[in-house]
Amino acid sequence: MRHVDSFEIQPPTPPSHNGVPRSAWARARRRVSRWHRPYIAVLLLVDFAAVVLADWMAQEAFGQARAGFYNAKEDPTWFYTVAFLLLPLGWLVILWGNRAYDRRYLGLGPDEFKRVIRGGVAVAATVSFIAFATKTDLSRWSVGFALLGALLLILIGRLTARFLLHFVRRRAGQAGHRMVLVGTLPECLEVYTAVTRTPSAGLVPVAIHLTDGYAAARGIETPVPVYAGRDVLALVREVGGDTIAVCGSASAEPGELRRLAWQLEGSGVDLVVAPQLTDIAGPRVHIRPIEGLPLLHVEEPTLSGPALLAKNLMDRVAAGLGLVLLIPLFAAIAIAIRISDPGPVFFRQPRVGHEGRTFRVWKFRTMYVDAEERLAGLVDQNETDGMLFKMKQDPRVFPVGRFLRASSLDELPQLINVLWGEMSLVGPRPLPADDGDFLGDVRRRLLVRPGMTGLWQVSGRSDLSWDEAVRLDLYYVDNWSLAYDLSILWRTVGVVLARKGAY
């Protein structure tokens, strides 16, 4: 961290152009950030290979794969051309048309996979239409196996490519975007905290450019250099950036954002906007232009309807199957607990659930039986703020319990709460019933069922402050979706294996 004691201040340089001097026919410079080019090339090869492999497996699995192709037994050339060249190329064209290779959707979030699935449906519809139009009698089993297999292999390939991309971003700091944040210091620091919380996103702030002067910022610690009164594009080139992020109120300056966009034309520098609606995301925000004025329309959170019914069904089915499959593991953990410290295997504590209803949560016991009596003598050693008591080296936890906590195995009995409808697989963590009355913003957590895992858990768990944990939980409540739930469940696997923030 560095203190803001002085700034490099220069008279603002006039914009290089206002959208007019550059010829409309001139070719814009290549983007400064180019990591996506080799990545997209790899995805094209992986997707092509996935389709070829799926077609080969379909041919090997079904003897009627060549049915419908004229003279295929004597001369299979046309069949091989369709199966191993035209169909894979058709997949790539349709995926490209569905923007499955758009750099904005690659590497993070569920949109990439949604577009791949949408492309798979389009391929199936196209093949069906062509077969119907040409009256080709194809083997339904072969075609179905090939299309579904190709879709699954493409998704697996993309997951693998994303894993490798995240590994490169976390370990080498490459394949990302170097950002210059523009706005007031508090707004820029808020965006800095948000984008650096997830290194796999590939967003690396390298400088801050203030829009409101510098006097109020003197002496404040900042993680990156701070500038004021500079030409933004010149600053970006000086610090080696490739993206300008306009933060908060700076995006509301009349005409300024448009002029900045004009100035960046042909520069190869990307422009992104982080509006003040930082805790409202994706499907809830729609741009509705009215007479040239783009209005951000914010929908209400989805707290009921078919999506919620599907979520509840998924919870119950997954919990039931999980409990059946985990019986041997539960038995082994129970024996280990009884050997470590005689007493009950399970620990049940009152927690506050959906709409303020109290229930008793199931957990494997990880502390000695006299843990509650010993708590009073440890209160002054609490290592977290807010409504929870946490110690990294809590003397009340026995050795096996420490392992259960680090691996999150102590949470598995909460599948019983999920099966009974008291909890969900994903949601805000249930808090003890005797730690407060959930006034103010915290009470909004109770609009959904508490979860076994949640955005709080995959973003740092016990390493987060109470205010940050509440903010993440409220973000989930306002923006949840089935796709978001599946994304959090996937991220939970990595967090649990890394034992990050668990104690």
Image (spheres, grey):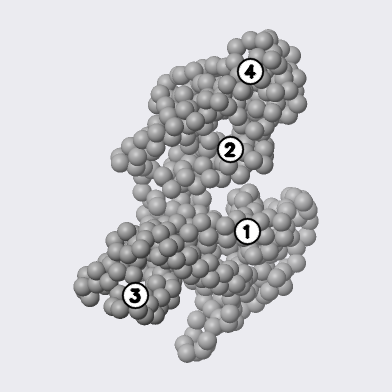
Amino acid beneath label 3: Lys
Relative to residue 310, is residue 442 depicted above or below? above
Relative to residue 474, is residue 170 depicted above or below? below
**4 or 2: mark nearer the eye:** 4
Helix, strand or loop for disc 2: helix
Q: Which residue is mark 1?
A: 164
**1 or 4: mark nearer the eye:** 4
Helix, strand or loop for disc 1: helix
Task: Write the residue at 24% across / 69% down.
Answer: 137
> Distance from label 1 to label 4 (Cα)?
39 Å
Callouts 3 and 1 close, C-beta under 8 Å: no
Bin the neighbour count of mark 1 within 10 Å (Cα to Cα): few under 14, some 14-19, many 20 and up. Answer: few
Q: Which residue is mark 4?
A: 335
Amino acid beneath label 1: Leu
Q: Which residue is mark 2?
A: 457
Mark found first going from the N terminus, 4 or 2? 4
Residue 292: mark = none
Callouts 4 and 2 close, C-beta under 8 Å: no
